[in-house]
Image (cartoon, rainbow, N blue to C red):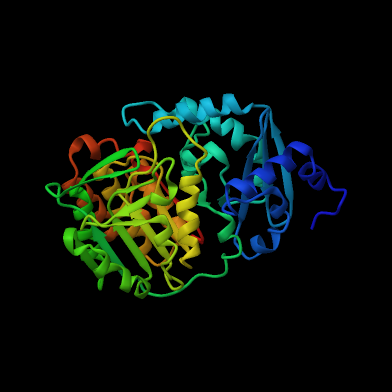
Amino acid sequence: MQNSDSPFVNFVNKPDVTALVTQLRRTARGQNLNPEQLARLQDNLQSLDNAALLYPLILEDRVELVLVTPTSLVRETVAVDRVKLNEAIANFRSDITSPSSNPIPNAQQLYQWLIQPIEAELEQAQVKTILYAADKQLRYIPLAALHDGKQWLAQRFTLNHITAASLTNFNGKRDRPLQIIAAAYSDPQLNYQFQIGEDQFSFNGLTFAGVEVETIAKDIPGTTALFNKDFNRENVEPRLGEYSIIHLATHAEFVSGLPQESFILFGSGERVTLPEIDEWKLPDVDLVVLSACRTATSGELGSGEEILGFGYQIQRTGAEAAIASLWYVSDGGTQGLMNAFYGALQTGKMTKAEALRQAQIALITGEYTALGEGRGLGVIGQTEASLPSAVSNRLSHPYYWAPFILIGNGL
């Protein structure tokens, strides 16, 4: 615990930091962390193996990196102003959302600002897992896709995004078999059009979402699989609490300016809004996966609250964690990543966050041995057989492996 004259307490009490904390409480409605909470987290970290919490706090003229390990609380000041940081974030996001780009230069620049200043402390604490509380525009980019000059951050650390709602929810692992409900809006001939506010929406089914769910059902016994018009609220919502994993391979959209209208689209054309998700009661659910979805990616980057908001809303249902995407993902690439993710999860040897990391590494390197020899070969075969070569030959680009982040308790 920090005493009242510690450097960290003095930092928290600085006028610009105090003003920012007040703003966070008002605008993020308790979704985000604030620096005052960080010093109280060390007890939580004691129960986790080699984990640390990283919070980059963005101020007008600098970034304050706050790192909490089980035994220390470190603050490093990075002399980069908000405008320059946001420009780098926008450039990096442009790179990682285009599979023909070279994202490494911007990935290295952000690495130098966000990770390099605390590298010695991470090494000293032998950190293997970073619990990450992203601030502002940093919510639009995956920490996993930063690059240290030799490799991607996903190849070095397990990464787990957290909100204030998940801070006290890192107690132990549930040891039980996978019980999955997996639903897909997969018929490309099935089109739904509607208007929300000023925005017109038009969606078609995603072919590879169907392959993805078929593969999950084939590989994991007892999976309940629903497709297209059978994927409706009447069939799905009353049964959600019966499963350990809810996997929805469909579109979702965060509606700019009308966050309460943000939705998940079911295969029947019905929409479930964020406030309606808040009514779900999922205390026995380990994971909610929104796969092959869309998030607010067009136009100028906002505050990222809609991304934080989805994860926060899932936490409020009682579910341990959510996996959601940060950009308009590749239908086929998502299928490859999800096949690898469930292959890793099926081994029973890794956490949800580590399974996502191993799936990302498999796509980066083409090496699937972490999934188990037989299972790994099966995932390679499924991926190569079902994906066009233009996708399967490029899966090492972060456009394919980095869009999905895990929010909540993935440990």
**Residue 135 in which image quadrant:** top right
**Residue 203 in which image quadrant:** top left
Q: Position of residue 9 (x, y in %)?
A: 80, 48
- Against 284, is 13 above or below? above
At horizontal 69% and vertical 54% (from top left) the residue drawn is: 37
Residue 261 left/right relative to 25: left
- Against 138, is 370 above or below? below
Q: Position of residue 314 (x, y in %)?
A: 45, 60
Is 321 in front, or is 176? 321
Q: Position of residue 260 (x, y in %)?
A: 43, 51
Number of callouts: 0
Q: Position of residue 236 (x, y in %)?
A: 28, 68
Is 63 in front, or is 146? 63
Furthest residue in direction front, as rendered = 197
**Residue 136 in which image quadrant:** top right
Q: Say if residue 346 shows up in the picture.
A: no
At horizontal 49% and vertical 61% (from top left) the residue drawn is: 315
Which quarter shows the N terminus? bottom right
Furthest residue in direction left, as rendered = 189
Is 61 in front, or is 335? 61
Furthest residue in direction right, as rendered = 5
